[in-house]
């Protein structure tokens, strides 16, 4: 217990530095503050990829890169002992944040140029239910 709370305190200290270095933005939403994403616009630099809906993703297409706000998530799951319960809590928070992310995208002036949402994760279960597709790096 002590190690978890210590780790969380240290992470809270370094999080603003990480936030600055990665040039992330907090997702501002009119309705809720309980959103677990931080974002930034980026240009896609990978190989051309065809998505399952027929969308062709090419180099220099604009995407919204999402990062999980780990400090906020850890506050909620740090003292939950059951890993399955922790996973369910994280899944539910991400799922509840998705509509708020859409509201944020709709509020951007260049929203019509955004081709999609991209993120890098080690999570491989449950992402399809959230509407994401997986591609290896």
Image (cartoon, grey):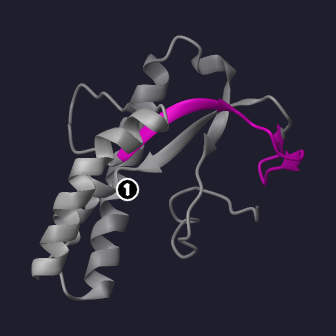
The answer to whether residue 98 is above or below residue 41 is below
Q: Is residue 7 left or right of residue 99?
A: left
| 25 or 10, nearer to the observer | 10
Coordinates of residue 57 in the picture (x, y in percent): 82, 40
Coordinates of residue 42 in the picture (x, y in percent): 64, 31
Q: Residue furthest top?
A: 109
Q: Is residue 16 left or right of residue 127?
A: left
Q: Let me know if residue 99 appears in the view.
A: no
Coordinates of residue 31 in the picture (x, y in percent): 21, 31
Residue annotated with mark 1: 94
Q: Is residue 2 left or right of residue 77?
A: left
Q: Is residue 128 left or right of residue 86?
A: right
- Residue at the (48%, 27%) spot, across then down: 105
User: Is residue 45 located in the magenta-colored stretch of the structure?
Assistant: yes
| 79 or 131, nearer to the observer | 79
Quadrant containing the C terminus is: bottom right
Q: Secondary structure at mark 1?
A: helix
Q: Let me know if residue 73 appears in the view.
A: yes
- Which residues fall within the magenta stretch? 37-56
- Residue at the (50%, 59%) spot, across then down: 130
User: Is residue 66 located in the magenta-colored stretch of the structure?
Assistant: no
Task: Determine crowd level at label 1: few under 14, some 14-19, many 20+ residues with C-alpha closer than 10 A.
Answer: some
- Residue at the (35%, 40%) spot, across then down: 17
């Amino acid at each position: 217990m002590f190690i978890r709370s210590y780790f969380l305190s240290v992470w809270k200290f370094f999080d603003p530095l990480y936030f600055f270095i990665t040039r992330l933005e907090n997702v501002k939403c009119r309705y809720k503050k309980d959103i677990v994403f931080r974002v930034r616009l980026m240009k896609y630099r990978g190989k051309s990829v065809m998505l399952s809906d027929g969308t062709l993703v090419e180099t220099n297409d604009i995407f919204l890169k999402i990062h999980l706000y780990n400090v906020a998530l850890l506050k909620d799951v740090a003292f939950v002992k059951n890993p399955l319960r922790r996973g369910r809590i994280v899944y539910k928070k991400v799922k509840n944040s998705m509509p708020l992310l859409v509201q944020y995208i709709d509020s951007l002036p260049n929203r019509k140029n955004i081709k999609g949402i991209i993120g890098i994760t080690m999570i491989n279960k449950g992402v399809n239910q959230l509407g994401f597709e997986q591609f290896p790096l």
